[in-house]
Image: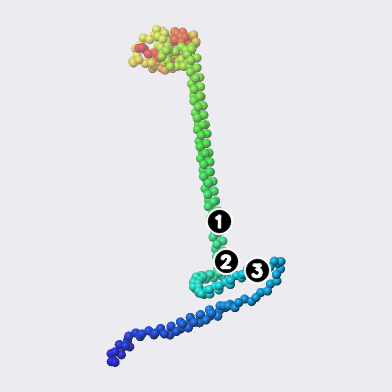
Amino acid sequence: MTTAALARDALMPHRPPGMGAGLVLALIAHALLMAALAFSVRWNTSPPAGVEAELWAAVPQIAAPRAAAPEPAPVPVEVKPAPPPPPPPVAKPEPAPVPDAQIAIEKAKREEEKKRADDEKKREEAEKRAEKEKRDAINREQALAKEEIERKKKEEAAKLKQEEQKLAAAREANLKRILGQAGATGDAGTTGTAARSAGPSAGYAGRIRARIQPNIVFGDSVSGNPVATVEVRLSPDGTINSKRLTKSSGVKAWDDAVLRAVEKTEVLPRDTDGRVPPVIEIDFRPYD
C-alpha cells in the first residue's frame, strides 16, 4: 500500500460497527420479559377437592353441574403513558411594597380623592353661582321692564290729563266766547271774544273830530300842519267833563283855538255800540 493510499484511507469516514451486539441484547431483554410473565401468572391445573353436603330436603335432589372455570384473562401489556408536558412557568409575584411606600401610595390616593371632591364641590358652587346670577339678571330685567311699563303708564296718564285739561280749557273758552257773542256789539269782521271792545271803534275819533272842528275859530296862517293832541274825559252820556292839552302843536294860537272848540261842543256823540268811552285823545291839525 502506498503512502497516497494510506493518506486517502485516513481521510475517509469509518464504517459503522455491525448489528451483532445490539441483536444479542434485544434477545436477552425479550427472554427476561417472557420469564417475568410466566412466573407472575399462576396456572391452576389440579382438580378441585371433593365437597361433602348434608341433605335437608325430603326428596333427594341432584345438584346441577358446576359451572366451567373461566378461562384466564390475557395478561395486559403494560403501556407506559407518555410523560405529561412540563407545567407552564409560574410568574413570580411581585414583592409587596414596603410599608413606607404603601403609606405614601395611600396618602397620594386620599389626596387625589380629596382634590377630586374639592373640584366637584367648586364646580357645583360655580354652577349654583352662575344660575343665581342668571336668575338675578332675569329678575333685574323684569323689574326694569316693569318700571318702564309703569313709567310709560304714568306718562300716558299725565299726557291724557294734560289733553283733558286743554280740552276743558278750550271748552270753557269756547263757552265764554259763545256767551260773550250773545250780546256782542263788534263788527262782523272783528276777531275779538269780548261782548264789547275795550276802546272806541275805528271811526269814532273821526266823528268826534267832525263834531268839534266846526267850533274852531282860527284865522292865522302857520307853516306846515302841526298837531295838537287833546285829552277829553266824558260822562256815560257823552258830556265833556274836562279837557287838557297832552301834546302842543308848537303854535299857541292853534292850541288855544282847539281847547275853546272842545269846551264849546259840550257833548260828544256815542260810539256805534251806544257807549261813550270815559277818556279819549283827539288829534287836531289846522289844514285837515
Q: Secondary structure at mark 3?
A: loop
Q: Position of residue 261 (x, y in %)?
A: 42, 9
In the rendered view, tell whether residue 101 sits above or below residue 219: below
Circle 2: residue type: Ile
Q: Earlier in the sequence, mark 3 or mark 1?
A: 3
Point 46% across, 10% down: residue: 273
Q: Is residue 165 left or right of residue 66?
A: left
Q: How far apart are the alpha carbons under marks 3 and 1?
A: 101 Å
The residue furthest front is: 59
In the rendered view, tell whether residue 195 sits above or below residue 57: above
Q: Position of residue 109 (x, y in %)?
A: 55, 62
Residue 64 picture quarter: bottom right
Q: Position of residue 175 (x, y in %)?
A: 50, 17
Q: Earlier in the sequence, mark 3 or mark 2?
A: 3
Mark 3, mark 2: which one is toward the viewer? 3
Disc 3: which residue: 62
Disc 2: which residue: 103
Front-most of residues 97 and 180: 97
Circle 3: residue type: Ile
Point 55% across, 80% down: residue: 39
